[in-house]
Amino acid sequence: MKNSIDRRVRKTKNVLRHNLTLLLSQNDLKNITVKELCEICDINRGTFYLHYKDIYDLFEQIEDEILYEFIGIINKYKYQKEMSWKSVLLDLLKYISANADIFKALLRTSESVLLTRIIDISKPKSKKEWILLLGDEKEQYYDYYYAFITEGCIAVVKAWVLDGMKETPEDMASLIGRMMTNSIN
Amino acid sequence: MKNSIDRRVRKTKNVLRHNLTLLLSQNDLKNITVKELCEICDINRGTFYLHYKDIYDLFEQIEDEILYEFIGIINKYKYQKEMSWKSVLLDLLKYISANADIFKALLRTSESVLLTRIIDISKPKSKKEWILLLGDEKEQYYDYYYAFITEGCIAVVKAWVLDGMKETPEDMASLIGRMMTNSIN
DNA sequence: ATTAAAATTAGACATAATGTTGATTTATGA
DNA sequence: TCATAAATCAACATTATGTCTAATTTTAAT
């Protein structure tokens, strides 16, 4: 077994992550100080600076870790004969649903660029497939179509999360899937 | 004539707006201090606090004023027999094009919620029309469709602005118009 | 159980920005 | 010209930041 990471470090980082997301569900990042966060966490402020540059660095690292989980989910499908993006989408939505609290906190802040980052990572890969679908004559506007559809999907996911995730991940995957295929034709 | 606002106040606010957008084309809002902004503007720091609560307040007021311009453009069409949203869109894009520098600076920051705000304002008005178009059976998902299309459009405008506005406002209006009508069907 | 290494703590420190104040000077509009 | 409003100057207390050292505690591995 073993995480290879010292238990104390693990604890420190966990409590900081946890309480920052708690604060983020009420405040904006710009109004949260290192001082108050550390007091809530009951850790020494110096300890914070041992691990993070500032509050924005902590925020980015939280997003990094979620992004890492996302990439893991995507890579599960990487070596399948037909990489079904609909299955990937469903798995991603399930992951979001299973971590609702974190995503509610992150996505309500305008500082979060989490979902855009996962799209940016997927862009080079999906670019080839899309151009085939869209046809050559639209290649000039490819980037605009890509931006339209992907940011549209992000907005749907955001709306879903922030409105309390009333629909199931399956429903949302099917809805988003329909929106995407409609837009491409 | 007359603006009714004291020339000195006008000058102060103008120089602050101008130099903040200049700074924003390089830095993020969170890294800009009142102190440095006032030094660049060559105004007393106390004068800043005479007009604004903090740097975020100034930023919001800049966005407010642009929003006010947007609403003015929209209202021009308010009392026409058929309120053609395509003409509104074109006029908005022309306005953005005419103020390229400001929009380049604002839209590159993740703190900006400018375009989303203009959409939110238009939402109640357009909701009725949309439901007619979409039909009753989709009313359950209306908000998701609305989020998808509007945020998609915002992403296209952003991409256009940040990539140097290579296409004309007319081209973009027609492209965005096609995207919207395609999505609704 | 012991121990060496690593992490955390307590506390102090200089630095820098913040927001406010009061007295003074300057610019404005009528 | 003149009363008024705005901007300035300079000082001030306050607060968070980031860094540091020495002391203490916890850990992981033997």
Image (cartoon, coloured by chain):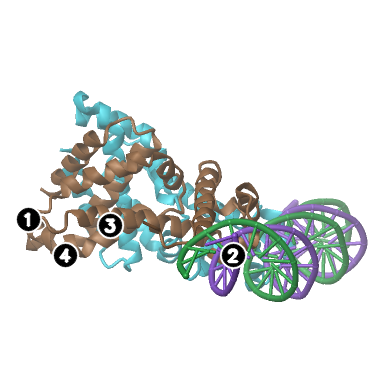
Chain colours: A brown, B cyan, C purple, D green
Residue that numbered label 1 is attached to: A81
Q: Position of residue A68 (x, y in %)?
A: 33, 58
Read off the chain for label 3: A
Residue that numbered label 2 is attached to: A49
- Which residue type carries mark 4? Gln
In terms of sequence position, does the residue under pointer 1 or pointer 4 come before the other? 1
Asked whether residue B78 is in view, the answer is: no
Please determine whether, in this image, residue B103 is positioned above or below residue A27.
below
Q: Position of residue A48 (x, y in %)?
A: 59, 60
What label does residue B17 carry, if any?
Answer: none
Read off the chain for label 4: A
Residue that numbered label 3 is attached to: A71
Read off the chain for label 2: A
Residue that numbered label 4 is attached to: A140
Q: Nearer the viewer, residue A81 or B183?
A: A81
How far is mark 2 from mark 4, CA to CA? 47 Å
Q: Position of residue D13 (x, y in %)?
A: 85, 57
Q: Nearer the viewer, mark 1 or mark 4?
A: 1
The residue carrying pointer 4 sits among few (fewer than 14), some (14 to 19) or many (20 or more) residues within 10 Å by Cα, namely few
Say which element carries label 1. loop
CB under 8 Å between callouts 2 and 3? Answer: no
The residue carrying pointer 2 sits among few (fewer than 14), some (14 to 19) or many (20 or more) residues within 10 Å by Cα, namely few
In terms of sequence position, does the residue under pointer 3 or pointer 1 come before the other? 3
How far is mark 3 from mark 1, CA to CA? 19 Å
Please determine whether, in this image, residue C19 is positioned above or below residue A155.
below
In terms of sequence position, does the residue under pointer 2 or pointer 1 come before the other? 2
